[in-house]
Structures are given as C-alpha cells and as structure tokens.
Amino acid sequence: MSLSTAEQRLIPPIDRIDLVVVKLPFVHPFGTSVQTWTHKEALLVRLESGGVVAWGECVADPDPFYMYETTVTAGHIIRDFLLPLVEPGKTLAEMNLRFSHVRGHGMAKAAVENALLHLIALQEQVPLHELLGFPPRRIPSGISIGLKGTPEELLVAVEQAVAKKYHRVKMKIKKGKDVEWVRRVRDRFPNLPLMVDANGDYGLNDAEHLKQLDDFNLMMIEQPLSYSDIFEHSLLQKSLRTPLCLDESLLTYADAMAALALGACRIINIKQGRVGGLIESLRVAEYAAARGIGVWSGGMDETGIGRAVNIHLQAAPAFNLPGDTSETSNYFHEDIVDPPVTLDDEGFIAIPPGPGLGIRVIPEHLQRYTISGECIRS
Ligand code: OSB
Ligand code: MG
C-alpha cells in the first residue's frame, strides 16, 4: 500500500525546534453548542533541519470544550514526552509506535507528525499528498456555518455559501435552535446538500425530538449525543432514517471499529489532529471507506498551515464526501500563510502545488499574531 512509503521515511536530523503560539481574530465569531470562539489560537511546531523550515499546527483550542486537549497541555506533552521520543534515523512508524506509549493526546502527536511529514516532503521536494502516496485531485469544498442570533442571519450565511458553490453546507444546531431553523433553511433551499452538527448537545431522551429532522432530507446529523458516547448513538441511529456522523466520539482506529460494528454511524468525520495524525487518519479512512462508510475531513478552524494539511490529506480517495475545508476569507481577514484557500467557480479547492504544503508562512504576519514562543532545542 502506498501509505507505508510515508511511514517508512526516516526522521531527519533536526537542528532546532520551536513551539510558537499564534492568535488570529476571526472575521465573525464561530458559535457552537459548546463554545463561541472569536479567535483562533493555535500552537505551532517549527522544525529546522539543514536550512529547511517546516511547520505543524496543533488543532487543540486554548480551552477543553471541544476536546480535552488544550494548547497548553499539547505544549506540555510535546515538550516533555513526545520530542524525547523523536530520534533521527528511526522511521515514522517506529516513532508512532513509541508515541503509543503516551495515552491519548492525539492532537499533540499529530502536530509533531505533521511537522515531520512537512519537513520530509520539503527535503524530498515533493508535495505532501505525493509523500502520502496520492496523485493530486480537485477537492470538493464544504462549509461549517456557526450558530447565529436569528434564522434570518443564518439564511444570509447559507445564501452566501450557495453563491460560492460549496458542495455541501453544514449548520450548527443546539437545543432551541434546531428543527425550526433547519426548516427555514430547507424551505429556502430545497435541493441544497445540507447537514447539521450538534456537538453533543442532546441525550437519548431527545430521540423523538431529533426524529423530526428526518423530514428535511439531511445528508447527516453530526455528533448529536455526548462526545464520549458510541453505544447510545447506535440506539439513536436505529430510530432515525437520517445517517448519523461521529466526530468527537472517534479518537482512535479502535473507536472507529467499535462505531462501525455497533452501527453507531454511517458516516465519519476525520479530523487528522483528533486521531493522532495523517498516517493514522489514512488507516481509519481506508478502513471505514472500504466498509461503505462515508468519510470526510473535518476542520478546527485552522490557520493556513493546518488547512493546507487537510487539503493534502483529501487527495486520498478514501475521503469520499466533501469536508469542512472552506475559504480562508471565511475565517480570517489576514492569515499567516500565502496563498489563501479559495474556491474555483465550481466550488472545488486546488491542492497548492509545490513541495511540502505548497504554502509559505509570511514572517511579518507570523510575528504580528504570535503571542508566545519557546525554543526547545537548538
Ligand atoms: O464540530 O466540527 C466541529 C470547529 C471547531 C470545533 C469543532 C468543530 C468545528 C467546525 C468548523 O465545525 C470546521 C472548520 O470550518 O474548520
Ligand atoms: Mg463536529
């Protein structure tokens, strides 16, 4: 399998490692049932090797409201437990085996793995998707629209997304902002590929209420029940026609196996950071896709570094549904990388060409949005 080629790559000697935290204001607040974020704060891993500089973005938020990891816990785990396991001359497969000694903390692991894969791709002068084993393809776009104050505001946002030709639109829901809000969008856009994401706001005792969503021909309902549940989703799925999609509940390959075996979902959202990196994501994606499960790449409102990683990952054919990768302008007035992500006139995203991620970190922008920096090794 092509995947093994990336796993068998050797870790290069590393001259310098920095952990940098950036904080960028969002164009508009991003509301979910668990938190409203006004900024993207992200921990970046910077590697320097033989004059080549590579980056990995940790997808953890500064708070533990989506997932238990935070930028601070990720810094701690990376500095004190993961980097000591990164040994030049060993393969990435060996590194991942060592990383498995650290329980959980997939976002921290992914940040290190992403940076190393970026470094290796740059040194070999190949695009990341090629290092992972996949030829380029146009990536169908999707957008995640946060909770709004009124249904009218939501309709404006959906209208803008439709005009951009996004291949599917996801709207966040929570108790009190669900069935009627979906009805409003559906009435206005009867044929739009539409889905909802509850970020775990409901319980199994809301099953009758959620059943009403079956009337709207939704592509899926993402994570209706608890972030830590798989079993109850399998009960809920039996009572709904609409496919369920798991996000928060799937932290590992074993979680995905359990979810599929129980029939807890028909679709999975893979956030490469949540499952511990690109190599692990491809294992999970290929496992699920081979069993007829819909697979797509989620997002964490990443800066241009993490966004580029998600785009390269989606070159893999196992990602068989449009994901949550939307245009840079949907998040930031100004990003830390060039070029920004844009859609073509058919709503596709081109994989940025060139070695590595195909993007350039803009030093002045990086400096403008950096809130802390720490050199770990030099
Ligand atoms: O549940 O998918 C989610 C963003 C932050 C935390 C959780 C989620 C999201 C998104 C946005 O839905 C995805 C994106 O646009 O990157
Ligand atoms: Mg989600």
Image (cartoon, grey):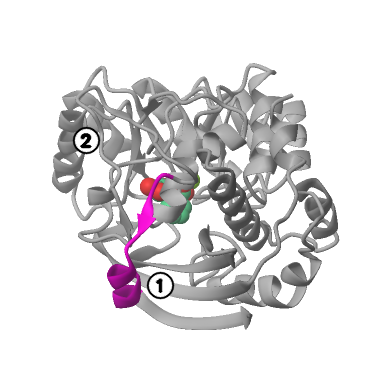
Q: Is residue 42 visible?
A: yes
Residue 240 quadrant: top right
Task: Tell me if residue 219 comes above or below residue 210 in the rendering.
Answer: above
**Front one among 60 and 374:** 374
Q: Amino acid at mark 2?
A: Ala
Side of 339 where 250 appears, left or right: right
Find residue 280 and report its horizontal and vertical position in percent: 70, 42
Residues at circles 1 and 2 in contact by the CB criterion of under 8 Å: no
**Front one among 142 and 184:** 142
Residue 180 quadrant: top left
The part of the chain drawn in magenta is: 358-369
Find residue 35 and report its horizontal and vertical position in percent: 41, 63
Q: Is residue 82 magenta?
A: no
Quadrant of the snapshot with the N terminus: top right
- Measure the C-alpha gap from mark 1 to mark 2: 28 Å
Task: Tell me if residue 329 comes above or below residue 55 in the rendering.
Answer: above
Q: Residue furthest front?
A: 50
Give the tally of numbered discs. 2
Residue identified by numbered label 1: 22
